[in-house]
Image (cartoon, helix red, strand yellow):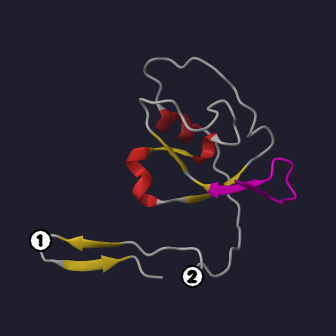
Amino acid sequence: MGLVSSNKRAGLLSGPVIYYEPNKTAPFDIKDPLKLPFAKTIAYSHQDEYRLVFGHRKAFKLIQQLLQERFDWLADAREKPGKSKEIRVGPLKEIVKIHSKIDSARGETTSNGL
């Protein structure tokens, strides 16, 4: 996982997603806020994902708290103002895999071509 330079104090993190099994010990430090944005359950490992993560101010400061039993993540996200960043990454041909899937009903192959 690399720290890409940025003019923001918190910076931009980049790296492959770390896939873990929820019922087993995680293969990374779950209290490391620099690793958490890259964590995803093993159910998504077929995506073989690479992420870019921006941090604003205290974004990478870990806060531990107990959540109410019926916490609504969607409502919480809607209450916070959205922020965006523009980043230019250039051609992706050298780093992107095109995954094909076969439509079993018709035997056709489709892809998300670039």
For the question of whether residue 52 can be seen, the reply is no
Give the residue displayed 71% in from the left and 30% down from the top.
Answer: 62
Range of magenta residues: 1-15
| Depicted 53 relative to depicted 28: above or below | below
Q: Point out residue 38 in the picture as x, y percentages from the top left corner.
A: 59, 47
| Depicted 8 relative to depicted 24: above or below | below
Assess disc 1: are there few (<14), some (14-19) or many (≥20) residues with their C-alpha within 10 Å of its C-alpha. few
User: In the structure shown, which secondary structural element does the residue marked by tag 1 occupy?
Assistant: loop
17 is within the stretch colored magenta: no
Rendered image quadrant of residue 108: bottom left
| Depicted 14 relative to depicted 91: above or below | above
**Residue in front for this viewpoint, 82 or 8:** 8
What's under tag 2, amino acid-wise? Lys
12 is within the stretch colored magenta: yes
The answer to whether marks 1 and 2 mark residues whose Cβ atoms lie closer than 8 Å is no
For the question of whether residue 100 can be seen, the reply is yes
Assess disc 2: are there few (<14), some (14-19) or many (≥20) residues with their C-alpha within 10 Å of its C-alpha. few
Q: Point out residue 67 in the picture as x, y percentages from the top left corner.
A: 54, 20
Give the residue displayed 81% in from the left and 42% down from the top.
Answer: 57
**Residue in front for this viewpoint, 61 or 81:** 61
Q: Which residue is mark 1?
A: 105
- Label for residue 93? 2
Rendered image quadrant of residue 107: bottom left
**Residue in front for this viewpoint, 112 or 78:** 112
User: In the structure shown, which secondary structural element does the residue marked by tag 2 occupy?
Assistant: loop
Please state if 73 lies on the left or on the right of 61 as rendered: left
What's under tag 1, amino acid-wise? Ala
Which callout, 1 or 2, points at the residue further toward the start of the chain?
2
